[in-house]
Amino acid sequence: MTQTLPPTTLAEDEAVTFTSELIRIDTTNTGDPDTVVGERAAAEYVAEKLAEVGYETTYVESGAPGRGNVIVRLAGEDSSRGALLVHGHLDVVPADASEWSVHPFSGAVQDDYVWGRGAVDMKDMVAMTLATARRLKRDGITPKRDIIFAFLADEEAGGQYGAQWLVDNRPELFEGATEAISEVGGFSITVKDGVRAYLIETAEKGIAWMKLRVRGRAGHGSMIHDDNAVTKLTEAVARLGRHQFPLVLRPSVREFLQGISEITGLAFDEDDPEGSVAKLGNIARMIGATLRDTANPTMLNAGYKSNVIPSVAEATVDCRILPGREEAFERELDEILGPDVEREWLGLRTLETTFDGPLVDHMTASITAEDPGAKTLPYMLSGGTDAKSFAELGIRCFGFAPLRLPADLDFSALFHGVDERVPVDALKFGTRVLDRFLRSC
Ligand SMILES: [Zn+2]
């Protein structure tokens, strides 16, 4: 039975305004800590909105000046139950204004969308969270369990100056948290005949940047030379770039594909999941990347003069590895790269939880109360988020930033994309869902 709740009109309007205003605070994170701007201003904006309704806010700079984070707690009926962490990042990736149809930091509200960098990644969820947190406090609502709201710096560069720093240095801020929600999940895809499936993120592929290095003998470019580092490195890089890793169906991916086939009535072919995924339309590029490990060479570096054979050549490879595949991946690399290529890893963590339990039930109930007939399905994100840092604290992490999206919107292309935007109606929908979810979970 669907419970009727007091109207959330004010919170819904605030979510739209906050999304727009947060976009106007340029929080570009290039990955170079010296160039980061705006995180402190965004954190102060959030802290002020929370303090205004009576929250006691904690402001923390994570590892460097200006890397602002805000954390607040809302006490629940039963604090002995594990707390729920709702986290969102305040930073965004760069945007080149010349490519956009509106200025990326304008926060323009037009054509029923809020436009700008961060509209879906993830100032939308930050704004919905902020609006809902304010509504709960303003109306004196006590949730069932403690809720920790965290607004964070530096997700887009891996969280060393944000979530990861807080987990390493201030874990007490998250004390008692057993479960968490954040990006990238809770959005709808229209499967068939207007039936929407909301994809809840239960797993993340591991991101590992790998540096390859080959050493050879330096020499003159005019001579016969059989120990050329550039030749050896590029051969290895080409082998790796062309390699196709084996098909592996992780539980979250299998459950997703089975769920889709139940809704559509189209058979799911275990032997050809790529064929099944190809039928999914825009979302295929996201789901397709969760069927195998990938290793894409992205940078090459060697030499300093046209006629000098360098003694060292280096390459960087962006590897995305399925949960549980870490060791097998390394073994496969040994074979592909051979003994002459040294490698150095820059971080590797994967994530996977199950799609079950009371929290998942509450997500589904909150969605279907607002979108009757909708389904929820687990899925694996091919990228990574701050969830990996919080998982180190034993927190079970989900991507649940609810948005009901138009069937023809190519949502996955908006992430870090040009003309990033979010439907006003989706923000209002998401705020209603979050309101239901946070008071009941
Ligand atoms: Zn994000």
Image (cartoon, grey):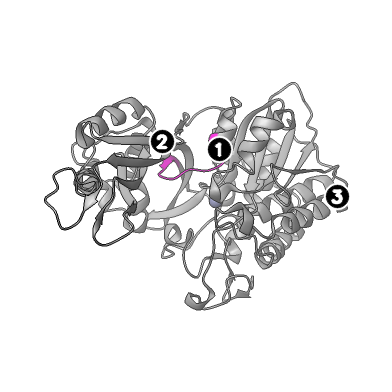
SS at circle 1: helix
The numbered mark, 1 or 3, whose residue comes first in the sequence reads 3
| Residue 363 on the magenta span | no
Q: Nearer the viewer, mark 1 or mark 2?
A: 2
Residue 11 % position (x, y): 74, 57
Residue 337 quadrant: top left
Count of all numbered marks drawn on residues in the image: 3
Q: Left or right: where does residue 3 sit relative to residue 417?
A: right
- The disc at residue 387 is 1
Residue linked to disc 2: 345
SS at circle 2: strand
Q: Quadrant of the N terminus?
A: top right
Q: Disc 1 to disc 3, how far (Cα)?
A: 26 Å
Residue 28 % position (x, y): 60, 60
Q: Pointer 1 and pointer 3: residues touching (CB < 8 Å)? A: no
Q: Residue at x 80, y 51 (%)?
A: 47
| Mark 1 surroundings within 10 Å by alpha-carbon count, few (fewer than 14), some (14 through 19), many (20 or more) | many
The numbered mark, 1 or 2, whose residue comes first in the sequence reads 2
Identify which amino acid the numbered label 3 is placed on: Ala
Q: Is residue 167 visible?
A: yes
Range shown magenta: 377-388
Residue 328 % position (x, y): 29, 27
| Mark 2 surroundings within 10 Å by alpha-carbon count, few (fewer than 14), some (14 through 19), many (20 or more) | few
- The disc at residue 101 is none
Residue linked to disc 3: 51
Q: Quadrant of the C terminus?
A: top right
Q: Disc 1 to disc 2, how far (Cα)?
A: 20 Å
Viewer-proximal residue, 113 or 361?
Answer: 113
Identify which amino acid the numbered label 1 is placed on: Ala
Q: Residue at x 21, y 39 (%)?
A: 269
Q: Disc 2 to disc 3, how far (Cα)?
A: 42 Å
